[in-house]
Structure formats: C-alpha cells, structure tokens
Image: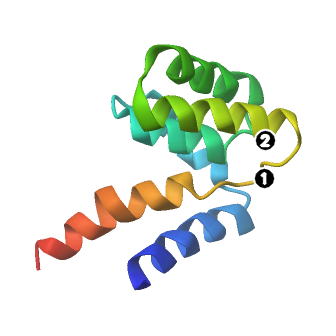
Amino acid sequence: NKYFDNANKCVAFLKEENALNELAPLLYEKDENLRLSTATVLLHIDTKRCLEILDDIAHNSQGVNKINAEMTISEFKKGHIWIANKLWSYLYFNIINNEQKKF
C-alpha cells in the first residue's frame, strides 16, 4: 500500500544519501519494536552495538520480538541480511498509519 511504500522510500532515501546513521538515536528509544527495527537496518553501520541490542531483545523479550531478534542475528551471521523490512513495517504500522487516522 502507499504508506508502506512511503516508508520504504524514506529508508531508501537515507541509504542513498549515506545518511542511515541518522537513525542511530532510535537505537536508544524505549519502544522495543523501534529498537529492533533500527538495529536490523543499521547492522552494517554499527554492527557491534546493533548485535548487542538484538541479543538483549532475544534474551529478554518474549513472543514475536524475541523470534525476530533471534532470526535476525542468525541470518546476519549467515550473510543474508542487508537492510531488512522491519523498520519499514514499524514506520507503517506505528507512525504513518496512525498519522493517517488523524485526518
């Protein structure tokens, strides 16, 4: 849908402008979903810190976030992760979609 596409464009724009590091402050947000998503997107920029965040979520969370963190770590170690869709999904479901409901 168009909101998911807009979120994709935002992250793609930051990547194109070599500005993905501008997302780094989101690694310290209270929202676990946002930390998980951001850590996944920034894995190749700040690998050590992002793996620490993912590991923390994998060991201290439950449910989907725990599984997502575990799978992200596993797939990253196998070389299968470049930029995942987790941040884009978060942006759509928690920010963009909510903004649309206000109108």
Which amino acid does the dot numbered 2 rest on?
His
The quadrant in which residue 33 appears is top left
Q: Quadrant of the N terminus?
A: bottom left
Task: Please state the horizontal and vertical placement of residue 70, each as a whole percent of the image.
Answer: 63, 29
Which residue bears the numbered disc 1?
A: 82
| Relative vertical location of residue 84 with respect to residue 46 in this rendering, above or below | below
Which residue bears the numbered disc 2?
A: 44
Mark 1 is surrounded, within 10 Å at the Cα level, by few (under 14), some (14 to 19) or many (20 or more) other residues, namely few
* Number of residue marks: 2
Q: Would residue 66 be found to the left or right of residue 80 on screen?
A: left
Cα distance in 3D space between marks 2 and 1: 7 Å
Task: Please state the horizontal and vertical placement of residue 41, each as a whole percent of the image.
Answer: 64, 48
| Relative vertical location of residue 58 with respect to residue 31 in this rendering, above or below | above
Q: Are marks 2 and 1 in contact (CB under 8 Å)?
A: yes
Q: Would residue 1 be found to the left or right of residue 72 on screen?
A: left
The quadrant in which residue 61 appears is top left
The residue sitting at 69% across, 25% down in the picture is 51
Q: Nearer the N terminus, badge 2 or badge 1?
A: 2
Task: Please state the horizontal and vertical placement of residue 12, each as a whole percent of the image.
Answer: 65, 69
The residue sitting at 38% across, 65% down in the picture is 92
Which amino acid does the dot numbered 1 rest on?
Trp
Q: Would residue 5 be found to the left or right of residue 73 on screen?
A: left
Q: Quadrant of the C terminus?
A: bottom left
In the structure shown, which secondary structural element does the residue marked by tag 1 occupy?
loop
